[in-house]
Image (cartoon, coloured by chain):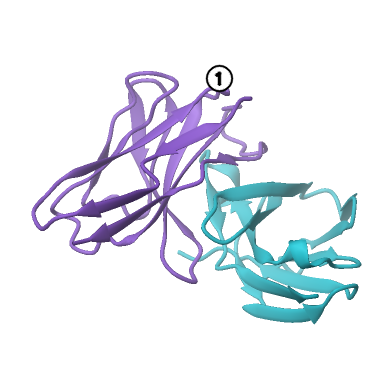
Chain colours: A cyan, B purple
Amino acid sequence: SQQGEEDPQALSIQEGENATMNCSYKTSINNLQWYRQNSGRGLVHLILIRSNEREKHSGRLRVTLDTSKKSSSLLITASRAADTASYFCATDADGGATNKLIFGTGTLLAVQP
Amino acid sequence: DGGITQSPKYLFRKEGQNVTLSCEQNLNHDAMYWYRQDPGQGLRLIYYSQIVNDFQKGDIAEGYSVSREKKESFPLTVTSAQKNPTAFYLCASNPYRGRVMDQPQHFGDGTRLSIL
């Protein structure tokens, strides 16, 4: 079953602009993670936010979590061409009942130089 | 450097053939995972293992098999029963801390499997 769904499916912006991606999920979670995937490569972990946290920063990344709305957002500020990639959210499956993640369908971000 | 190595990078399967994808990690992680990714899609879990000599089916295990004889290795066999094997296969690992999945997963760079 699809736990996380990202919105939008695709996003095209100019270098220097901010990019915002959203993720919605269905069941209770212990934490939510964001990953990045360059074309033809594996996923790279970006940030993990726990269910008792509302906001987290890492460099140019800002993640928010609203457990009442079952949603999260990833903001990339001052984007660069090198940020072009697909971005996925992932949640611990079954509210943490099992040691596995459920991934969303991803947002494809294109940053134009 | 510690990491996950998947091989080969590209693999072609003939009709009726079984093929095995390799995944090796030197991160000393207990848990390992296999995912399938179709074009423009997210990741779907095939199998996962939390400890040597034990593994569990994921959401799309039919037509696949795995083994976990060593902590470092988690090979995936795509059997002839898998009628639509063309996809990008990703292996991942993370430290196993019990039921709560609060550790990032580390990924290999994938194997792209196609049918001849």
Q: Residue at x 48, y 34 (%)?
A: B5
Residue to which mark 1 is pinned: B28
Which quadrant is the C terminus of chain A positioned in? bottom right
The spot of residue B101 in percent (x, y) is 61, 39
Q: Residue at x 54, y 53 (%)?
A: A41
Decide: is B23 above or below B82.
above
The spot of residue B56 in percent (x, y) is 35, 37
The spot of residue B1 in percent (x, y) is 63, 25
- Residue A60 relative to residue B34: left or right: right
Of A105 and B16, the residue lying toward us: B16
Which quadrant is the N terminus of chain A positioned in? bottom left
Of A24 and B23, the residue lying toward us: B23
The answer, for residue A113, to whether it is visible in the render is yes
Residue neighbourhood size for the residue with mark 1, other residues' Cα within 10 Å, grouped as few (<14), some (14–19), many (≥20):
few
Residue A17: image quadrant is: bottom right
Q: Secondary structure at mark 1?
A: loop
